[in-house]
Amino acid sequence: MQTLLKNITKLIMPRIFVYAGLLLFIVIFYKATMQRGSNVGYIIVSIPFIAVGMFLLLKNPLWSFIILFISNYFIMGVIRYISLPIPISVFMDSIISFMFLALILKTIHVRTEWKRVLNPLTLITLIWFIFCILELINPKITSFADWFTKVRSLAFYPIIMVILVSVILSKYKHVKLLLLVWSVLTLLAAFKGYWQKNHGFDSTELVWLYVGGGAKTHLISTGIRYFSFFSDAGNYGSCMGFSLVVFSISAFYIKNKWLKVYFLIVALSGGYGMAISGTRGALAVPFAGYTIFILLSKKWEFALSSLFILISAFCFLNFTTIGNNNQTIKRMRSSFDTNDASFNVRLENQKNLKERLKNLPFGAGIGFGNTPNVNSPDYEFSVIPSDSWLVRVWIQTGVVGLSLYILLLFAGIISGGYIILFKIKNKELGGILAALLAGVFGMTASAYGNEILGQYPTCYLYFISFAIVFMGKHYDKELEEHEQLT
């Protein structure tokens, strides 16, 4: 009899607590709605769902990383339509902080391979981060706030992305999941660009163009430059060129036949987005990216065919006038024109900057020009357009900083190439890593023509792709062990 009562109690008591909790929740919701209004009631209703969501995200940092990845891609488009209660950087930093909290909690209960953080790319980004901190003693820096604002994208995000990838993307399947998410985002970005081109801009985008000043750089004599849901056409074009390189190369190495076709469609969508952006500097992404892929490719027949296509595209754009009646082709062709007016203006700006920076080996300071003072003797200097990420680094850190920055990036690219050529045995993995490194190299080349590596989503994409390459040995070992077991 006692056993029966215990069993009944075990069965009934949990349900009593559940029903009592639901009843209490309904009472609180009703009273809050009646006394404070429906908005307060909606907030109370959402609390349990938010709590469950937070619990699941804390339990699995990978999903927090995916949310960060998606937010990074959409954030610049979202703020055109809604005003965030906090600055964008604070919002993104909050997600990053949440992820680190999730990792710490996970470490308490599950063994986490933090030692994977100890790789050459972490050292490279750490050296650059330390240099940027030492820039605080640069006498030209007058505001810690300005330094902190700019150092995020310049040095903080790179090392954070490397750490997060090294710990969270611990399995090869995580990389494939990230590629799938990236592919969907690329298709959405291409579709939005297509919609702008064929159906026009919506009211919010028109306000950004005509009131916000975007028309000066996007509605020009050579045609309209489309920007999708990105910050501007330059960012859009380079990022879509990145997708073109990564997915076109991955398509030839991925084993799944359906994914091969799908990745080729994504690559073509990326190429379309790059073309309609009207961003000449974005052409550097496929040209530089495919060039380094040729060096990384172990299939020489494939490398030779890629080289033939690359040379053909260069000759078509540089030595012919075919298709000049098409504004998109005409603007792409102007990338190779050394007499182009826009190109010469950039060279003149760089000449002026060189004159002003000749006595500033460590630059004008990180954050320089962020809040220009019209009464400052450096005001004229601060408003000279850099038109380039590498020029921006040069202005803020001087010839010493720029030299170190380029040296570190190329050290990372060479180290990554060495890993792919000599340490990776799995062909599919090797191809995908080569695709990512080719995209990284292409974006590095494009950084001369566009201020892209400090913007969302390119800054995250660049260093996430870079970090995955340096995780290649761990993925290869995992795949080798799996093959032995099966």
Image: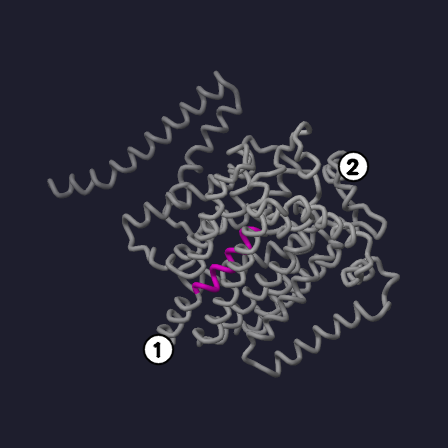
Residue at far left of view: 2
Q: In the rendered view of the protein, which quadrant contains the C terminus? A: bottom left
| Residue identified by numbered label 2 | 210
| Three-letter residue code for mark 1 | Gln
Q: Secondary structure at mark 1?
A: helix
Q: Residue at x 57, y 73 (%)?
A: 257
Q: Is residue 216 magenta?
A: no
Nearer the observer, 235 or 200: 235
Nearer the observer, 149 or 59: 149
| Three-letter residue code for mark 2 | Tyr
**Helix, strand or loop: magenta stretch:** helix
Q: Residue at x 49, y 39 (%)?
A: 136
Q: Secondary structure at mark 2?
A: helix
Q: Residues within 10 Å of mark 2 (few under 14, many from 20)?
A: few
Q: Which residues are magenta?
A: 459-471
Q: In the rendered view of the protein, which quadrant contains the N terminus? A: top left
Q: Quadrant of residue 305?
A: bottom right
| Residue identified by numbered label 1 | 484
Nearer the observer, 115 or 431: 115
Inter-mark Cα distance, 2 to 1:
62 Å
Q: Quadrant of residue 485?
A: bottom left
Q: Is residue 462 magenta?
A: yes
Q: Tell me where residue 393 appears, x and y as whole percent.
A: 59, 49
Q: Residue at x 56, y 51 (%)?
A: 459
Q: Residue at x 62, y 52 (%)?
A: 390
Q: Quadrant of residue 76?
A: top right
